[in-house]
Amino acid sequence: MLHVGIVGGTGYTGSELLRLLLGHPGVAVSAVTSRAERGMAVCDLFPSLRGRLSLSFVEPTLEGLAGCDLVFFATPNGTAMKMVPDLLAAGTRVIDLAADFRLKDPASWERWYGQPHACPELLDEAVYGLPEFNRDRIRAARLVANPGCYPTAVTLGLVPLLEAGVIDPDWIVADVKSGVSGAGRKAELGLLMAEVGESFKAYGTGGHRHAPEIMQNLALFADRSVNLTFVPHLVPMVRGIQATLYARLTRADRQPHALFASRYAQEPFVDVMPRGSHPETRSVRGVNLCRIAVNEQPGGVVIVQSVIDNLVKGAAGQALQNMNLMFGLDETAGLISLPLSP
């Protein structure tokens, strides 16, 4: 039995981790931490877990976590990097669901996250946890940087085209919409239902923190820097990300849909839909799945639609997928379910 801990168990990502872990046949949750809710029973905060978990929230201490085989950090950016070196030294492996280890350049981290990196010496070791492209390195990793939700949807939707060299790396547009749970579980005026409902807006048009992560990913597969226009939007739904991606085709002899069908044929959590399809976010609600549609318009433009549940394939589900790989478990363990409908 694999013993795991969760640091930061009170947010949407933490609660989603608990929901998935409690359904995993090979995992025991040993510790769930929260400074603010220390001493409260976890199921009192999350009644959906009643009868499934008897733990109470505890302080996040090295002593309390070092006995775990793996610790998940579902914490604000800048938190995990302060504890990770000591946990690794104690022999505990780590998956960070925040951004602390996603960017390889510490100067870029400081520029986008407003603080110096606490352990830049670990950035090269940290493995970017997108299994579809990094499976072998994840298996051997001590430290996995779980991808962001926007980068997951965009990267899965663009890499097959860049790998094959069939699009212009200097002209890529990512128009992406997210539900409000992507902003976290906090009391904020702009996230109230009365503010978000019956409305729709773009944000971060001058630059978003996920942009350098996406461009870092795409550059690896293009074997050069890319010119990406990335605009996120907030839509009045709880879960889901819809990424509509535009690129200019540079080769008429390759069929984009066929590239995707071939690239993802053996991937358990990527579904390439038939030509002419238009995937909906509700078709992946609650599951660790990315659905992709690939279409073309006259003039040599390819349009890729990529949808995920931001809390599952965009966060907690992908973290479980990485955990399974790290410990030699069936990659799909604890993750096979059907989307919620309606």
Image (cartoon, rainbow, N blue to C red):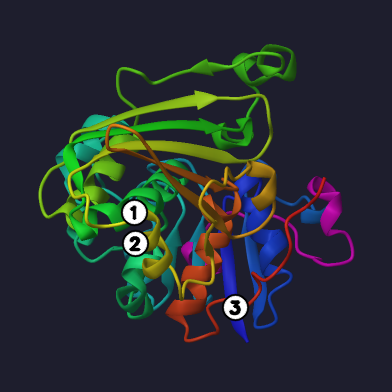
- 246 or 284: nearer the viewer: 246
Cβ atoms at labels 2 and 1 below 8 Å apart: yes
Q: Amino acid at mark 2?
A: Leu
Left or right of 237 on screen, residue 148? left
Residue of label 2: 259
User: What stretch of residues is rendered in magenta?
Assistant: 44-66
Main SS category, magenta section: loop
Residue of label 1: 256
Residue of label 3: 3
Q: Amino acid at mark 1?
A: Pro
Left or right of 30 on screen, residue 121? left
Q: Which mark is residue 110?
A: none
Q: Residue furthest left?
A: 224
Q: Nearer the viewer, mark 1 or mark 3?
A: 1
Q: Residue at x 70, y 81 (%)?
A: 25
Q: Quadrant of residue 23?
A: bottom right
Up/down of 263 relative to 157, above or below: below
Q: Residue at x 36, y 50 (%)?
A: 155
Q: Residue at x 53, y 16 (%)?
A: 201
Q: Quadrant of residue 336?
A: bottom right
Up/down of 6 relative to 199, above or below: below
> Sequence order check: which comes first, mark 3 or mark 2?
3
> How would you rate the neighbour count of disc 2 (Cα within 10 Å): few for under 14, some for 14-19, many for 20 or more?
some
Where in the figure is residue 303, as x and y percent of width and height?
Answer: 39, 39
Where in the figure is residue 74, as x and y percent of width and height?
Answer: 53, 51
